[in-house]
């Protein structure tokens, strides 16, 4: 009987060694898979810190069939200036509140670097809303690709 016991102990020892080697093999395979598996390439937070693509972006307003362009100049993280371009003499005569309303809005937008909480007088309400809409469209075009929900590359107009 003692010989059978020794055989059982030797088989049990072999089973234990085999189990340990199998466990170590599985751990080694899992370690290799985790080390060499391709990682998801997420953009670094430093790449998306830029709010805008630098340049001059325009948005048009149609007034009685005449186009007036609002040009917004941006740096990589701020709004530098807002101005009207391609203004005909007829538009400036027919809409005298456009220039003062734009100047007032431009000062506020540049100071706050945002279109939120902009105030305007009640007599310039509609003019200011039209200008704000045009500035917002231009800023949407200027938004850096990581900061915009729309594809800003297709509508970008830059001048340097």
Image (spheres, rainbow, N blue to C red):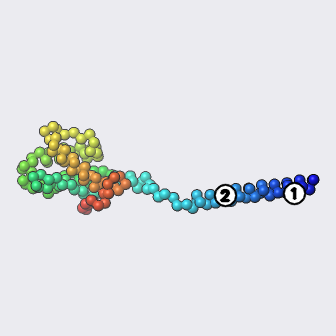
77 sits to left or right of 40? left
User: Mark 2, residues whose alpha carbon is within 10 Å: few (<14), some, or many (≥20)?
Assistant: few
Which of the 4 image quarters holds residue 160?
A: bottom left
Task: From the image, tell me which residue sits under label 1.
Answer: 7
Kindly identify which numbered label has been placed on residue 26. 2
72 sits to left or right of 39? left
Report if residue 84 is visible in the image: no
Mark 1 residue element: helix
Tell me which residue sits at (11%, 45%) in the image. Answer: 97
91 sits to left or right of 112? left
Residue 27 is situated, as x and y percent measured from the top left of the image, at: 66, 56
Instruction: In this rendered view, identify the residue nearer to me: 79 or 122.
Output: 122
Instruction: In this rendered view, identify the residue nearer to me: 102 or 130.
Output: 130
User: Mark 1, residues whose alpha carbon is within 10 Å: few (<14), some, or many (≥20)?
Assistant: few
Residue 105 is situated, as x and y percent measured from the top left of the image, at: 20, 44
Mark 2 residue element: helix
20 sits to left or right of 100? right
Report if residue 88 is visible in the image: yes
Instruction: In this rendered view, identify the residue nearer to me: 96 or 78.
Output: 96
Kindly identify which numbered label has been placed on residue 75. none
């Amino acid at each position: 009987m003692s010989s059978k016991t020794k055989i059982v102990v030797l088989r049990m020892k072999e089973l234990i060694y085999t189990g340990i080697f199998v466990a170590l093999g599985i751990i080694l395979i899992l370690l290799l898979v985790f080390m060499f598996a391709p990682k998801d390439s997420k953009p670094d937070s430093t790449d998306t810190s830029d709010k805008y693509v630098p340049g001059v972006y325009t948005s048009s307003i149609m007034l009685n069939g005449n186009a007036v362009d609002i040009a917004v100049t941006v740096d990589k993280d701020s709004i530098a200036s807002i101005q009207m371009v391609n203004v005909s003499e007829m538009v400036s005569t027919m809409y005298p509140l456009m220039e003062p309303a734009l100047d007032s809005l431009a000062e506020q937008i540049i100071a706050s670097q945002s279109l939120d909480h902009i105030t305007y007088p009640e007599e310039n309400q509609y003019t200011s809303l039209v200008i704000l809409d045009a500035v917002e469209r231009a800023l949407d075009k200027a938004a850096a690709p990581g900061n915009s929900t729309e594809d800003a590359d297709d509508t970008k107009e830059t001048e340097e």
